[in-house]
Image (cartoon, grey):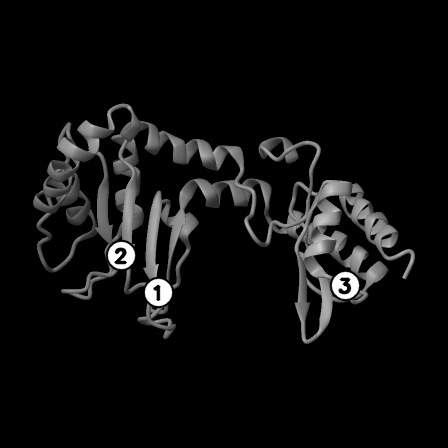
Amino acid sequence: MRELFDLDPSLVFLNHGSFGACPRPVREAQRAWQDAMERNPVEFLGRRSAALLRQAREQRAAIALPLDDQGFVDAVMAEVTPRTRLVFVSHLASTTALVLPLAALVEPAHARGLPVLVDGAHAPGQLELALDALGADFYTGNGHKWLCGPKGSGFLALAAAIEFHREHLGAPVRRACHAQALALMHELAGHFAQMAALPVPPCDPEALRQRLFAKHRIEVPVTQHEGRSFVRVSVQGYNTREDLETLARALRSAFAHG
């Protein structure tokens, strides 16, 4: 799996928990959107963006009540023109409280080459969400409404990242990563999931972090909590047993003389 990431081949990367490496397929999907803008940033941002946003606001489908699933889909798709670049739709409408038939809309939108962005502000906590089944390209949701989360909480789900995670980082990989982390914990202490906070003798955390990187090319954070020092290991699908053994050898060497 490591070949799907652009990590430095000489680096033992055990710090996915801080800034996780982004897989190449996800970055390519992101870059496609960036490329569309970068072909002519002045035109896209300076001359096109206002019109595109205005057009998106103006070309909203009028939905007749009572709601009919096929009628909803037909009404939305009737507003599609050659200039349409995105279908934006609510999951649970604020003004009418209607649950809209998103799954029925995604297929015809994709058939026209249009990505679908869903405003799911009211859905999390009211509806059972199965984002894979919906098939939308982007899904935003609030956590401070029906999930009763703190103000400002929310999420953005990206189809490319979800697809990569489902294909490459599913339950078997997570179990394997957990097993690797657990094996190292049994050697050096603790009990965690895909991250392990390994207790080490008292030390200067930054000096140890720099030593591990400079001498062994290991990228891993060294933390402190209540006067104790820890090496916090993150195990992701691209890590191997050899990565963890390299860290174990480096730590034994660092503390071999006291």
Disc number at residue 91?
A: 2
Task: Give neighbour class at mark 1: few <14, some 14-19, many 20+ (Cα, 10 Å).
Answer: few
Element under disc 2: loop
Q: How many marks?
A: 3
Left or right of residue 93: residue 242: right
Left or right side of 234 for 188: right
Tag 3 residue: 203
Q: Is residue 101 left or right of residue 192?
A: left
In terms of sequence position, does the residue under pointer 2 or pointer 3 come before the other? 2
| Earlier residue among tags 3 and 1 | 1
Determine the secondary structure under disc 3: loop
Q: Is residue 215 visible?
A: yes
Residue type of the residue flagged with mark 2 = His
Instruction: Give the x, y percent position of residue 205.
Output: 70, 60
Identify the mark at residue 60; answer none if there is no mark: none
C-alpha gap between disc 3 and disc 1: 50 Å
Quadrant assignment, res 106: top left
Q: Residues within 10 Å of mark 2 (few under 14, many from 20)?
A: many
Q: Residue 204: horizontal and vertical position, in percent?
A: 73, 61
Q: Vertical placement of 75 versus 9: above or below?
A: below
For the residue pair 60 and 19, the one nearer the viewer reads as 19
| Three-letter amino acid code at the position of disc 1 | Leu
